[in-house]
Amino acid sequence: MSSDDAAKQQELKYHERLNIAVLSIAKIKELIKSDIKETINAWSKDRDVGKQAWHVVGPAGVGKTEICYQIAEELTNHFGKLFDIIMVKAPVLSRDDFIIPFPVVDGKSLKFKMLYSDFVPEYVEDSYGMFVIDEFSRGDHTLQQLLWQVQNEYSIHQYKFPKGWFVISIDNPDDSAYSMDTMEDAAGLRRQLHIYTEVSPIDFLNYAIAQKFHPLVIEFIQTHPEFLYDFQAQLQGSVYANPASYEKLSDHLWKMHLNGGIDFNVIESKAAGLINTHMTRMFIEFAQEKKDINPKDIFENLQAVKPAIMEFKKEGNNSKLGQLMVGFCTYMTTSQPEYKQENLRNVEEFLLMMPIDTAAIFITQIDKFDRTSSAFKYMTKIHITLLKESKRYEKEFYDPIVECGEGKLV
């Protein structure tokens, strides 16, 4: 490869260089969990299929580590027995933390016996678990070489892992602001199934709602899904907003909420160290001044926010209208609020207020969901109901979108 070709290759994003799939963190979780279940089920049917070592790559704080614990918990519930997890942090470990030669006298001979640390799964028949290597590519080369054996052979030196143990390694991409020590060669690449995770506000909000994050955090990201991950701040080397930092912010809000009330002066100081000062100012303004149009208000009380929406339209502020539409779709697909006739009329009127290219976001956002997902079914039901009940909706919203080539939603 020429120097120019090498430079162009380096400019590509990690997933582009490796030519691998890009999925949301929720889809990756289901992919890994299903593969483990299918592998174990195949063994129970006397088909000795091989295990798959996974390599999950994605931005820091997106939830890669968290899904491993979720997978272990959900597989424990599925199989009705412990599905254990051992997670090791490659940057703070060395090869000697895993395996140490220990001198022993055998008769008249001095031999060395290998001692294995408690990082290594204990060999117990019919035991199950995941061995997770966090920040694999930030470990030194000698450690990576040992861990490659783990990924390829499910063993360390001559010690074999229990058959029911699976291996997952986790990495941040080397196209971002991380200190990496990546050993990418043909042998290293073939050992794992590589997959890249993108930042997904929908996944974050589904998790946040299920875990009962503080309502201010949920509403802020529903209104501004574009604020979930601050890539620009990250590249500048400053504190940056990400899903993990919003979870910590939620904890701080709940602690104050449950102990006398939220002091936003204190929250401002804390949040700045989690999501940076710029993002904190926007969060505080959202929480205190309610200047932003909350998507929930569009659904429940459109007339109260209609003047502000019409002002954006009068100004030709399509960027703001587009953000509002994305925020509305994000709120609807994550909260999936129960609706009455008046709510459907609010949805209809809101969509008809929008320029057609902005209104089309409503359709394109729905189309991104898996057809079996609850979000797709929920939004499709609203769409079909409006089509059946409102000729105006069909004539002024649906038909123009079809004419623009967006296609039908059925």
Image: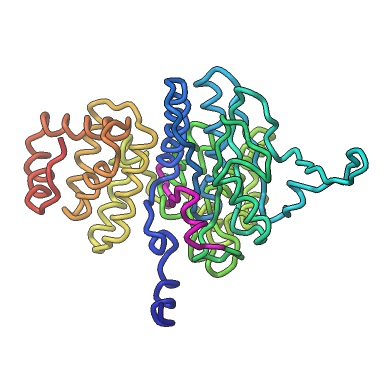
The residue depicted at 24 percent of the width and 63 percent of the height is 316
On the image, which quarter does residue 321 sit in? bottom left
Quadrant location of the C terminus?
A: top left
* Percent position of residue 135, x then y: 60, 53
Q: Position of residue 45 (x, y in %)?
A: 42, 20
Q: Nearer the viewer, residue 360 or 135?
A: 135
Looking at this view, is 361 or 48 the one in front? 48
Q: Position of residue 143 (x, y in %)?
A: 67, 55
Based on the picture, tell me whether residue 196 belongs to the magenta stretch.
Answer: yes
Percent across and percent down for residue 106 are 88, 39
Between 367 and 21, the one lying in front of the other is 21
Q: Is residue 247 left or right of residue 306?
A: right
Instruction: Indicate left or right for 100 with 220 as reference.
Output: right
Outermost residue, bottom side: 3
339 is within the stretch colored magenta? no
Instruction: Identify which residue is drawn at 23% across, 47% down.
Output: 364
Quadrant in the picture for residue 16: bottom left
Q: How many marks?
A: 0
Up-down: is 126 above or below 5? above
Residue ranking furthest to the top: 80
Colour basis: rainbow
Q: Quadrant of the N terminus?
A: bottom left
Q: Which residues are magenta?
A: 183-203
283 horizontally vs 11: left or right: right
Residue 389, relative to residue 407: is it above or below?
A: above
Q: Residue at x 57, y 31 (%)?
A: 163
Work out whether residue 147 or residue 47 is closer to the camera in this orientation and state it. Answer: 47
